[in-house]
Image: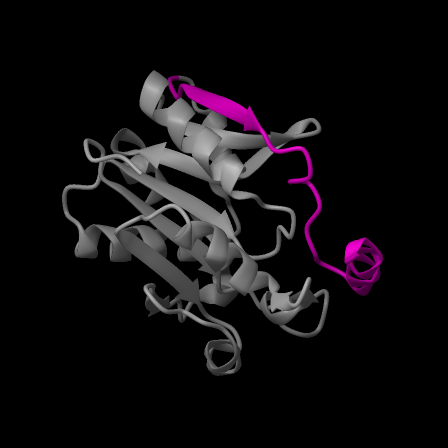
């Protein structure tokens, strides 16, 4: 994406889909699994360092997706929540590329993610150089989100089911947002799956 800035991407896909009862990473949408959709959008952007964090049902997931070009790392503590996957992913990215300037985090259950969403996030982060740039949908902010290296120590301090949104409540944590209109639709329940099927046209 940028010769001057060293950016890694981390796809967080370690969760157990407990509310759904089956791996949402493998749900089909427009002929592909949700995780493959996410991987494809990342592949379009030419990142050098690409990390895929798996945990629950990892053998089943690896058997059914194309992880080509991604370094797959396993979060054995995935049941502890999102923070553990963020830390595993960031540590893996830093191990691959010690001089990282930014890390872009994504999840695997946002079916309406587009390449343009990621480009806007990266552009805003590079132009304004905040500690982070989050996606905004409705009244909420979240992933995809990109973090500058000043935020890395804070990410590594997250615990339990805390996501990186928590950092926005820190007093000196400056951040930007970019609108992701359909980012609020994710897949957690069977009702969500049925709704997604209605949209799969």
Magenta stretch, residue numbers: 172-201
In the rendered image, the vertical position of residue 195 relative to residue 113, given as above or below: below
For the point 52% across and 82% down, which residue is it?
Answer: 60
Q: Is residue 196 left or right of residue 175?
A: right
Residue 119 in percent (x, y) is at 44, 34
Placement of 38 over or under 113, stated as above or below? below
Q: Give 123 or 153, whichever is nearer the viewer.
A: 123
Q: Residue 197 colored magenta?
A: yes
Residue 50 occupies quadrant? bottom left
- Name the spot of residue 68 as percent of width and height, x first: 36, 69
Mark yes or no: residue 99 visible: yes
Q: Position of residue 97 (x, y in %)?
A: 17, 50
- Residue located 68% across and 51% down the image: 186
Quarter occupied by the N terminus: top left
Q: Is residue 130 above or below residue 30?
A: above
In which quadrant will I find the C terminus?
Answer: bottom right
């Amino acid at each position: 994406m940028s010769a001057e800035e060293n950016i890694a991407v981390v796809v967080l896909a370690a969760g157990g889909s407990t509310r759904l009862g089956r791996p949402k990473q493998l749900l089909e949408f427009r002929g592909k699994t949700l995780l493959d959709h996410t991987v494809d959008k990342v592949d379009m952007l030419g990142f050098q360092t690409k990390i895929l964090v798996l945990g629950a049902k990892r053998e089943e997931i690896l058997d059914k997706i194309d992880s080509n070009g991604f370094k797959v790392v396993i979060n054995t503590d995935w049941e502890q929540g999102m923070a553990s996957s963020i830390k595993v992913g960031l540590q893996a990215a830093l191990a691959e590329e010690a001089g990282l300037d930014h890390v872009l985090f994504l999840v695997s259950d946002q079916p309406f993610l587009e390449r343009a969403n990621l480009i806007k996030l990266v552009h805003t982060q590079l132009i304004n150089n905040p500690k982070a740039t989050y996606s905004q949908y409705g009244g909420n902010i979240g992933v995809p989100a990109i973090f500058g290296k000043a935020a890395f120590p804070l990410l590594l301090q997250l615990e339990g089911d805390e996501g990186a949104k928590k950092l926005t409540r820190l007093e000196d944590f400056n951040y930007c947002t970019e609108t992701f209109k359909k980012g609020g639709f994710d897949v957690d329940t069977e009702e969500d799956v049925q709704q997604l099927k209605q949209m799969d046209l």
